[in-house]
Amino acid sequence: MPNAKQFDAIVVGTGQAGPALAARLAGAGMTVAVVERDKFGGTCVNNGCTPTKTLVASAYCAQLARRAAEYGVALDGAVRIDMQQVKARKDAVAGRSSQGVEKWMRGLKNATVLQGHARFTGPRTLRVGDEAISADRIFLNVGGRPLVPKMPGLDAVPYLTNESMMDVDFLPEQLVIVGGSYIGLEFGQMYRRFGSRVTIVEMAPRLIGREDEDVSDAVREALEAEGIEIRTGAECLSAAREGAGFSIGLECAEGAPRVSGTQLLLAVGRVPNTDDLGLEAAGIETDPRGYIEVDAALRSSNEHVWALGDCNGKGAFTHTSYNDYEIVADNLLAGAARKWTDRVPIYGLFVDPPLGRVGMNAAEIARAGLKALVGKRPMTRVSRAVEKGETRGFIKIYVEASTRRILGASLLGSGADEAVHSLVEAVYARTPYTELQKHVRIHPTVSELIPTTLESLEVLS
């Protein structure tokens, strides 16, 4: 493009991968353009991990206060939730993170920050507002956004998404959440603990369908024990105005045919921000869902363009996005041959009790045709959980029968989102579980029961 300003590299988007990559490239002496159209920090910082886990912490505090008498702690009066203060705390935590990323980018030597929406005009050129820029290396870290489903009547009903939910500073009287997976369950529990009546509606036969059935059942039991109504198998959803609120039509095998509410939260998934980047002009291919197709090194069909984070469909987590940065930077600057396909899946569900997942689950083991063993231990037999009065859940670990290597684990319970990390190295290294059992762990912790869980392996049927 004539008159395009030349850079060595262009980084579009400042989510988890973009800023670190820009800093490393600039530190290596490259001139770098950093493009951001909205708030710095991407989804995680602004309307994902950081603000939602801050809200989860407030909700946990409220629940613990209600249970104070169980611990011999007397509180005078009822627990009162100040939603404006809850939101203010969340905004402050997220705001500091976003401002920190922006200050970091603007202070980088060899880097130029451009604010605006970037669109490709050619294989190596983009336009940001009125400015044309070009580089031989372009990195897309453009993230994703909430999916709004095609639901009859939805256009006549006000609704919230996980992004617009960040602006709520009041307590919904009756919150209906469409979507019984990770985002929906976290919001459902937190708002129930704040004091809302909550109904979670899921089209599938059970919650969090990608997890093992016993995990889904245990999470459902925990949520229902707190007074959350859960409707699964809800097919043919429709929405309609109903007085000052709305109602959702269900077609469930059990329960009433409609559920009413005052606020509606849609939590049915996300879509990548790739539809308005002009990818066709750059020869960048996407899959049917809009994710940029990449090879094992995260390079797109255009050899000058890499896709990192949510827009490539290879993880959609903060930690996988950051790992994308590490892979790309090491390959470019250190001559490495790293691949995203070498990554072991690991993630969490931050309800209470939390879920920590690593490696394969039962369905994945079956699809791979592996013969496996499974060990399981209830949290009622974990001292740390008993001492804390948080005994819901279990530890479950899968082992390959022939090699004795650990294939994966589902840890649901107090501290499980941290305890799961004690298995990560063993899964990566294909360590036989018999070796893992030899390692001494701290008492009393949740992690200390991992070797004990492996003492009672049974054939996975």
Image (cartoon, rainbow, N blue to C red):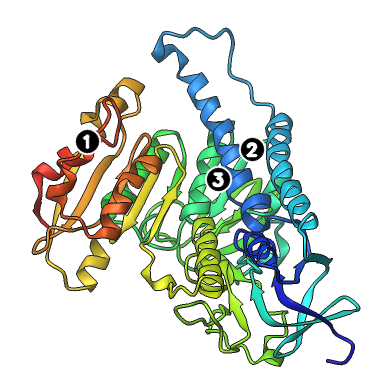
Mark 3–mark 1 Cα distance, whole angstroms, equals 30 Å
In front: mark 3 or mark 1?
1
List the residue tagged with mark 3. 187
Disc 1 residue crowd, few under 14, some 14–19, many 20+, Cα 10 Å: many
Q: Secondary structure at mark 1?
A: helix
List the residue tagged with mark 2. 173
In front: mark 2 or mark 3?
3
Q: Which amino acid type is shown beneath numbered disc 3?
A: Phe
Q: Which amino acid type is shown beneath numbered disc 2?
A: Glu
List the residue tagged with mark 1. 449
In this rendering, the answer to whether 43 lies above or below 333 is above
Q: Quarter of the image holding residue 54? A: top right
The answer to whether residue 361 is visible is no
Find out whether the residues at labels 2 and 1 contact each other: C-beta distance under 8 Å. no
Which badge, 3 or 1, comes first in the chain's sequence?
Answer: 3
> Percent position (x, y) of residue 230?
44, 48
Judged from this view, the residue extending furthest toward the front is 29
Which badge, 2 or 1, comes first in the chain's sequence?
Answer: 2
Between 401 and 156, the residue placed more toward the observer is 401
